[in-house]
Amino acid sequence: MGFPGSMSSISREDVAHLARLARLAVTDDELDRFAGQLDQVLGAVARVGEAAVADVPPMSHAVPLTNVLRADVVTPSLPRDVVLAGAPAAEDDRIRVPRILGDAE
Amino acid sequence: MTSTRTDLTSADVAELSRLLSTGEVSAVEVTRAHLDRIAAQDGRLGAYLHVEDDAAIAAATAVDEARAAGDELGPLAGVPVALKDLVVTEGVPTTSGSKILEGWLPPYSATIATRLAEAGTVLLGKTNMDEFAMGSSTENSAYQVTRNPWDTDRIPGGSSGGSSAAVAGDLAPWSIGTDTGGSIRQPAAVTGLVGHKPTYGSVSRYGLIAFSSSLDQAGPMARTVLDAAVMHEVIGGHDPRDSTSIDSPLAGLADAARSGAAGDLRGVRIGVVRELGGEGHTEGYEPGVLARTREAIEVLAGLGAEVTEVSCPSFDLALPAYYLIAPSEASSNLARYEGVRFGLRVGDDGSHDLDEVMALTREAGFGPEVKRRIILGTYALSSGYYEAYYGQAQKVRTLITRDFTSAFADVDVLVSPTTPTVAFPIGARVEDPIAMYAADLCTLPASLAGLPAISVPSGLSDGLPVGLQVMAPALADDRCYRVAAALEAAQDAARGHRLLDELPGRAAA
């Protein structure tokens, strides 16, 4: 699905689609509010398009480091009980997960 | 020494350190004084999300016992500290200001928390913040409003607003903040504190709850430039557990602050950035802020610095570039809150599958600003829009960095106001994201380029603090401390006391 409308414009339907992609079960009220606010923000940030950057390389990071490797040494992991204590649901020494396949599938 | 009770909470760290090492006060006395004041005053300010209470007294007791036993202790042993609530602390609640982490007890500690503990500091508690550090007023906290000690109807800045209110309100002698687009510098400016954003990569991000990983940096918030430099030396340095950590030590920061305070800036070249409040670029800046900035620059020139105006044309595009890059990185970073491994889980009643539980959990756990930024970031990274938004923003980031590089060919530091206005009233910008984002106008360029930048008080406007920002080349954090300390010392001497002593109702230290 594409995003209808002009480039620096974001509709209620766009927001609903993006919220689904981002796993946010937004309410109707939020869709109304966010669409207006995001349209405003997008209008403001679209100004990056004004920059003349034809030959400019992109910069992802301030520190030019690549392939930082740690020493290949075994170090202790977090204890299982400690990790499970932080999980929302645990069962049989494992994290319990909701079903991953829906009925309709 | 009953009179020291008040003094202990308004003293700077250098003074507390002296009192503790000479045995004039005990660590328990210092900690107790802070906990008492938090109990009495934090209902009004709302700086803390969690207070350590008994654990802080236990830590202070251990310091006193070690000192009594004749152990060799560092200069900071027994000095209390507050941490922004996105610094993970083993067994101590850490929420990042979000309901999605309510009740979570981290199973490990951030490197900076460990380093502060190893220096003997006593953790007082965790400070309020905008949820996931997204905001400039701390009003985006899912838990509570934090008030500016200078005027409790106004914001304390953000996102490190709990950390700024705690230190300005005498609820901690210093604190840790984090800065992604200005979240240390802007709250420091509007509360009359010193706040420094270190060179990106010079302070470990291990154990900091991520917002925008290419920008996030932790740093000190303090009452004096020297205190900030001392804390920076404690938390800084290489950490193999952060792959972006720079393996070259930053030393001599406290020395730079001391040398700056001596008041000789001859040979220092200062560039005033035209695009940040200069001629033709004053829209949105309060006259009082611009006046304090001009006066501060005159003070620096009076100390021998050579002042010139510098143009950095791409800085005009820092705000739009930042508000594409940071939300894009956030939308990816915050994908980890899926309701499975830790934190909140909502809708797990057998009728919803994993995808639905994830969406319900994130809907219930995230506040409006976090959702807005996740949606914006998802949009900016989506196919068909990536080049026009995220890709273009990354190129603008290069232009901004080039502007800095060419400016630093001619000057040693750059200065500007820290933020265009004094603290604004609570509620004034909540429904207007664009107006809120404008608070970061001056701090964003150094964030995008990964450069060090400090905010130091420059005076009051309408009775509210104004900050001067000093920016330096990568790894030249010492220049920020030197110039900031020179301004601080000259202004303190001229007015006969510290700016913070003008805070209504505050006892002079």
Image (cartoon, coloured by chain):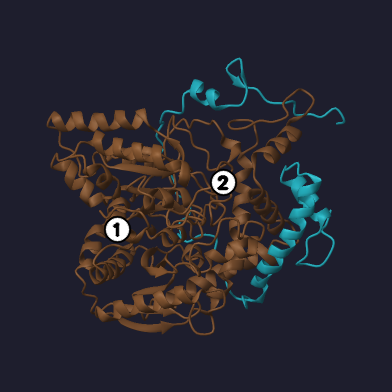
Chain colours: A cyan, B brown
Above or below B430: residue B235: above
Compare residues B30 and B241 and report the one nearer the observer.
Answer: B30
Residue B249 in the image: state x and y as whole percent.
30, 55
User: In which quadrant of the rendered view does residue B97 lie?
Assistant: top right
Q: Is residue B318 visible?
A: yes
Residue B141 is tagged as 2
Of residues B156 and B377, the one drawn nearer to the viewer in this rendering: B156
Q: Secondary structure at mark 1?
A: loop
The amino acid beneath tag 2 is Ser
Figure quadrant of residue B54:
top left
Crowding at label 2, few (<14), some or many (≥20) Cα neighbours within 10 Å?
Answer: many
Q: Chain of mark 2?
A: B
- What amino acid does circle 1 point to? Thr
Q: Secondary structure at mark 2?
A: loop
* Residue found at x 67% / y 68%: A44
- Which residue position holds label 1? B224
Q: Considering depth in this image, is B188 or B423 the residue closer to the camera?
A: B423
